[in-house]
């Protein structure tokens, strides 16, 4: 090994064991899959939101044209219902994104803890006579 590699080896110890490396790659792949699903969900929710806003606008116009009749009240209430439904989907998307961020941070921290524990155990074994 070259001198810089020796210094790094002395500072941080040998590379990770295969088990920790497999756990890290598995966790990163899982995070990537979840982020891909979230991006798809984001596109679907965005399209749904645009559709519901247009539909609600049409219903409000129809409700406004027939404001004195039962049909006008019905279309106005229907517009409000669909607009609130779209808002619920947007809120769910926001909550899912927050949950994804928290899960990613927790997985990476648990992997870092496992690496630190493995290195400490390795140092303890080296120091024992």
Image (cartoon, rainbow, N blue to C red):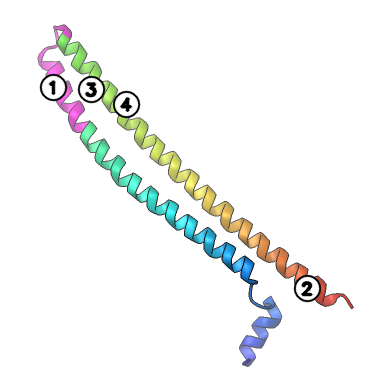
- Residue drawn at (63%, 91%) of the image: 1
Q: How far apart, in angstroms, are the residues tagged by discs 4 and 3?
A: 9 Å
Badge 2: residue crowd in 10 Å (few <14, some 14–19, many ≥20): few
Mark closer to the chain start, 3 or 2? 3
Q: Nearer the viewer, residue 113 or 61?
A: 113
Residue with the most extreme left position: 65
Q: Position of residue 51 (x, y in %)?
A: 21, 35
Q: Position of residue 109 (x, y in %)?
A: 61, 57
Disc 4, disc 3: CB below 8 Å? no
The residue under label 1 is 61
Query: How far apart, in angstroms, are the residues tagged by discs 2 and 1?
Result: 73 Å
Magenta stretch in the rendered image: 53-70
Count of numbered circles in the view:
4
Secondary structure beneath label 4 = helix
How far apart, in angstroms, are the residues tagged by discs 1 and 3? Answer: 9 Å
Circle nearer the N terminus (1, 3): 1
| Sequence-earlier tag: 4 or 3 | 3
Q: Which residue is mark 3?
A: 79
Q: Is residue 125 above or below residue 50?
A: below
Numbered disc in front, either 2 or 4? 2
Q: Report how far apart the C-alphas of labels 2 and 4 lie in the structure.
A: 58 Å
Q: For mark 2, what is the residue?
A: 123
Q: Residues within 10 Å of mark 1 (few under 14, many from 20)?
A: some
Q: Is residue 94 a member of the stretch shown in magenta?
A: no
Above or below, 52 against 126 in this view is: above
């Amino acid at each position: 090994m070259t001198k810089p590699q020796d210094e790094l080896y002395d500072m941080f110890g040998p590379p990770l064991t295969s088990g920790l490396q497999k756990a890290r790659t598995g966790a990163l792949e899982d995070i990537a899959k979840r982020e891909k699903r979230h991006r798809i969900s984001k596109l679907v929710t965005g399209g749904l939101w645009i559709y519901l806003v247009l539909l609600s606008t049409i219903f409000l116009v129809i409700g406004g044209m027939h404001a004195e009749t039962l049909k006008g009240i019905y279309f106005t209430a229907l517009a409000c219902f669909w607009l609130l439904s779209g808002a619920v989907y947007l809120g769910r998307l926001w909550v899912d994104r927050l949950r994804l961020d928290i899960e990613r941070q927790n997985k990476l921290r648990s992997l870092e803890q496992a690496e630190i524990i493995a290195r400490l155990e390795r140092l303890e074994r080296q120091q024992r006579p």
